[in-house]
Image (tube, rainbow, N blue to C red):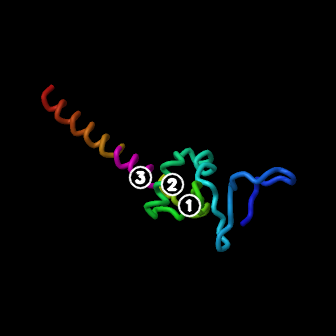
Amino acid sequence: MESNNLTQGAPPGPLFHIVIDGARYVAAGVLAAESGYCRDYITQLARRHRITGRQLGKIWYIAEEPFWMFVIEQEKERELRRSHMAASSRRLFHAHQATQNKFT
């Protein structure tokens, strides 16, 4: 295991990241701070196998690259939903306007 938070002479604390089978795993709390997602939500995604993660003791470590790919995919899907909702709202507005204009 490899750690980026151990300093010479300091007692070992929780590891912020580890390497398993060549893949970098980062503590869920660190990813939560960096991504804006809640740590509990990130660990729930890992437990449900939506993202790759491993629990070591009480700490969940999440495969960093697949996590960020998941975040990017979620942002794309959210933007697609927004554009569909905006288009739908415009259609409803114009349909409503057309019916209002018929009666004036």
What is the distance, in whole Å, between disc 2 and disc 1 at their CAs? 9 Å
Q: Residues within 10 Å of mark 1 (few under 14, many from 20)?
A: some
Residue extending farthest left:
103
Of helix, strand and loop, which one carries label 3? helix
Left or right position of 53 against 16? left
Could you tell which of marks 2 and 1 lies nearer the N-terminus?
2
Could you tell which of marks 1 and 3 lies nearer the N-terminus?
1
Image quadrant assignment for residue 20: bottom right
Q: Nearer the viewer, mark 1 or mark 3?
A: 1
Of helix, strand and loop, which one carries label 1? strand
Could you tell which of marks 3 and 2 lies nearer the N-terminus?
2
Q: Quadrant of the N terminus?
A: bottom right
Q: Residues within 10 Å of mark 3 (few under 14, many from 20)?
A: few
For the residues bearing labels 1 and 3, Cβ distance under 8 angstroms: no
- Residue 43, numbered label: 2
What is the distance, in whole Å, between disc 3 and disc 2 at their CAs? 26 Å
Looking at the picture, does residue 98 appear above or below residue 23? above
Question: Which residue, given by chain and number where applicable, does mark 3 sit on?
Answer: 80
Q: Nearer the viewer, mark 2 or mark 1?
A: 1
What is the distance, in whole Å, between disc 1 and disc 3 at their CAs? 33 Å
Total of numbered circles in the picture?
Answer: 3
Q: Quadrant of the C terminus?
A: top left
For the residues bearing labels 3 and 2, Cβ distance under 8 angstroms: no
Residue type (three-letter) at the residue carrying disc 2: Thr
Q: Position of residue 51 (x, y in %)?
A: 50, 62
Looking at the picture, does residue 2 appear above or below residue 35? below
Question: Which residue, given by chain and number where applicable, does mark 1 sit on?
Answer: 55
Query: Magenta residues: mostly which secondary structure?
Result: helix
Residue type (three-letter) at the residue carrying disc 3: Leu
Q: Which residues are magenta?
A: 76-85
